[in-house]
Image (cartoon, helix red, strand yellow):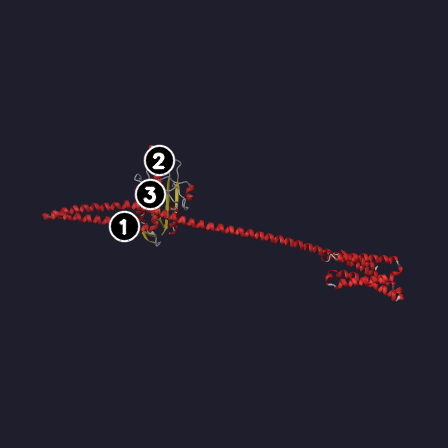
Amino acid sequence: MDFILLIIAFRFLQRHPLTKQEYPEWQSIFMKALIAACCFLAIQLIFDRTDGIIRWIAHGINVYVLYATYNRPVFYPLKPYVYAFFPVVLVHIVQDLARLIMPEFYRSWNEIFETAELFAWIWLVAQFIINHRQRKALEVERIKAIQKEIEYKKSQKLKDALEVQVAERTAEIMAQKEELLQTITELKSTQSLLIQSEKMASLGELTAGIAHEIQNPLNFVTNFSELNKELLEELKIELAKGDLEEIKLLVGDLEANEEKILHHGKRADAIVKGMLQHSRSSSGVKEATDINELADEYLRLSYHGLRAKDKSFNASIETDFDEKVGSVQVVSQEIGRVILNLVNNAFYAVSEKKKQVDELGDSSQLSTYTPTVWLSTKRTHKGVEIRVKDNGTGMPEAVKDKIFQPFFTTKPTGLGTGLGLSLSYDIVKSHGGELTVSSNQAASKSSENSFTEFVVFIAS
């Protein structure tokens, strides 16, 4: 039985994974020891006289193998198998030692020795089974650990790849952000230029009207100055004659003419001041302003400005100023710009309508259609209303929804920037007011049912 144990032990050591992986050169040594154990077993079975010696040789080898396996650190994983073999080896040594020294004692307790041997073999088999299961469990855990490590490496690679993609996407987004910021900067610059262009266009129209308007008082000043010169010549003659009555009449005429010259000079001065005031940037300070006077002035300036650009233009103007309106706290330059813009649009609408009617060549319509712009003011219990109405082309619902949007215009390219009504809307809003529109566009171009009316409401 001892050599059988050796055969089992050497076979186990020769096939153990530790031997294969760490010490492959020992496989041949264990194989030779296995062959030697088989030879000793054969000798023991064939030659009965050598049984005792062979047994003690086997005991010695078994003890040495157990000692070497247990004592060397490199064989630490094999210690559970040492614990499995040790009871069998110990029982066999004690059994043979008792048989050699105390034969009577051995024969008396033979059954106990056999029972101990049986339990030792059961212990060996049980330990082998337990160790085999534990080894399989450890192998499963090792495989799982390897799989987890592989998955971890895969996840790390995926993470690295994702980080690279995120970095590339971030760089792309940052580049797009820079492009958008550059585009926004350019758009703001373009918007500022367009707003300045709109202001300059408004100033140009206003200047044309002022030039025409200022010409009237200057003509009066020139005419009355020439007339006074003639009266002074006559006065010299009458002084030489000594005709006091005629002299008094001439002096009276001179005084009247001087008053007229003074009146029209002040009128020209007021127009120039208004032009300078309009051309300056608004201070944003509200002041008491006569709304009726402001509306009338900018109405006439708009009309004369259009007349200066287009001599064929002509329209009827109807005003209805409520005397109860009085003075309102507003920034006069800004509200004046709003009125000028609305009146300019109204004159443009009636001019376009007149051209459409002329193109149709309908004599009946030509005789009935009169381009007309209405400007009225009204005091309500909440504030002041300024209404600008025209019987021009009107506008559809789709246009009304967009009319106050920046850069939206119904005029042909080059005639409008689309900022006039947008700026007007913002100006009225900044005064705590409201700018609204109502309109109707008739199916026929020659119909007189089309109209547009803008209402400026200022709380006061």
Distance between the Cα atoms at labels 2 and 3?
A: 20 Å
Query: Nearest the camera: 264 or 278?
Result: 278
| 218 w.r.t. 7: above or below | above
Q: Residue at x 36, y 33 (%)?
A: 360
Question: Around disc 3, counting alpha carbons within 10 Å, would you say few (fewer than 14), some (14 to 19), or many (20 or more)?
Answer: some
Per the image, the residue denoted by label 1 is 270
Image quadrant for the N terminus?
Answer: bottom right
The image shows residue 208, relative to residue 362, as above or below, that is: below
Dot 2 falls on a residue whose secondary structure is: helix
Q: Residue at x 43, y 50 (%)?
A: 185
Figure quadrant of residue 84: bottom right
Q: How far across and how far down the image is residue 228, in percent?
A: 18, 47
Q: How many marks?
A: 3
For numbered disc 1, what is the local secondary structure?
helix
1 or 2: tag closer to the N-terminus: 1
Lateral position of residue 378 relative to residue 262, left or right: right
Q: Which mark is residue 357?
A: 2
Q: Residues within 10 Å of mark 1 (few under 14, many from 20)?
A: few
Q: Which label lies toward us, 1 or 3?
A: 1
Query: Is residue 101 found left or right of 320 in the rendered image?
Result: right
Circle 3 residue: 374
x, y percent for residue 219: 23, 45
Q: Earlier in the sequence, mark 1 or mark 3?
A: 1
Does the rendering let one see residue 125? no
Nearer-N-terminus badge (2/3): 2
Residue type for callout 2: Val
Residue type, label 3: Trp
The reply to whether residue 162 is in sight is yes
Real-space CA distance between mark 1 and mark 2, rounded to the nearest whole angstrom: 39 Å
Q: Please state the horizontal and vertical placement of residue 177, each as a whole percent of the image.
A: 48, 51
Q: CA distance from mark 1 to mark 3?
A: 25 Å
